[in-house]
Amino acid sequence: LVLAKKLNTLEAGYARQREHNSQLLYRVLSLQGNIQVCCRIRPITAAELKKKNRKGKFLRPAVAQQSETEVICYSSKAKHSGYLKTFNFDKAWGPNEQQEQVFQDIEPLAASVVEGFNTCILAYGQSGSGKTFTMEGSPEGKQQGITPRMIKKIFQLIALKKQKLNLEAEESKEESKGEESSESQTFDSTIQVGILEIYNEQLRDLLNPRDLGKDADSASGKTRLNICRNEAGNITVQNLSRRTIHCPEEMLNLLEQAKEQRSKATT
């Protein structure tokens, strides 16, 4: 019994520390601003190293990391040979930085989600620039991308918050024994997932393969999707399929199913 109480005390202390850390992260995000723009430079491939330009010279990298927030671009035009231009970002990752390092810099967003803030991570870049690798990576191991890491982190934070609040409710219940009013509130959560694709200005519900999206014919039984604001004033997608999930594995399985339904075209 004594050991169990000590364990509960340690767990409570750990949960409080995690909550304190989360609050510090919120403050950092507030100082940085609600919208942050980052840049990741991918390594040069072996095939690219063998390529030559019209003059027979080997190609060289067009960009390089100058600092944690600066990127240098080299001009490829002959009249501007050697010309450098610097661009500033909220964060810049060089070609040698690993997936884990990238995730560590955006990990605070998971805490924002758990606290009820709307959060978005948008990967933008030309074909072959490394968007899919950065976001998805490999299914397991050190090469996991942002998406699977963020999903697991969110579930972990939800579990810690539930443990903390339920423990506080139990303590409050113990302290209020014998009193007329001894109501205590516990924490519970429900996670629902919807996956939407916008392709050629059409909306497609990737969890409902038969749905052709916004321009679907209602007479054919297809559901019409519509982006609008709900009663609370938040942007939502009407008639988008949503699935309730209980663990990271279920979420990752849904993502795999949705990937099979994505529009595929040569780029």
Image: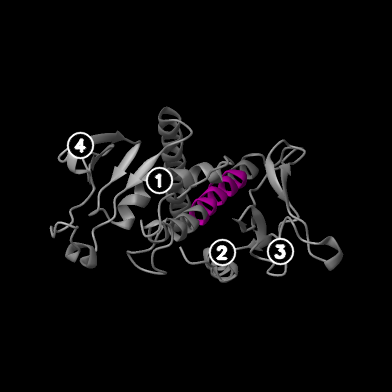
Q: Residue drawn 65% across and 44% down?
A: 173
Viewer-nearest residue: 175 or 56: 56
Question: In the visual, does 89 lie left or right of 58?
Answer: right
Tell me the quarter of the image containing the C terminus: bottom left
CA separation in Å, label 3 and label 2: 23 Å
* Residue where numbered disc 1 is placed: 106
Label placed on residue 251: 2
Q: Residue drawn 57% across and 39% down?
A: 117
Question: In the visual, does 170 lie left or right of 223?
Answer: left
* Residue where numbered disc 4 is placed: 84
Mark in the foreground, 3 or 2? 3
Q: Position of residue 151 (x, y in %)?
A: 50, 57
Mark in the foreground, 4 or 2? 4
Is 141 above or below relative to 150? below
Count of marks placed on residues: 4
Sequence-wise, the earlier of marks 4 and 2 is 4
Point out the stretch of residues depicted in magenta.
Answer: 155-170
Residue 190 visible here: no
Sequence-wise, the earlier of marks 3 and 2 is 3
Residue type at mark 4: give it.
Leu
Residue 206 visible here: yes
CA separation in Å, label 3 and label 4: 47 Å
Q: Residue drawn 44% across and 54% down?
A: 7
Q: Position of residue 58 (x, y in %)?
A: 14, 59
Viewer-nearest residue: 139 or 27: 139
Label placed on residue 176: none
Label 4 crowd (10 A; few <14 / some 14-19 / many >=20): few
Residue type at mark 3: give it.
Leu
Sequence-wise, the earlier of marks 1 and 3 is 1
Sequence-wise, the earlier of marks 2 and 1 is 1
* Residue where numbered disc 3 is placed: 212
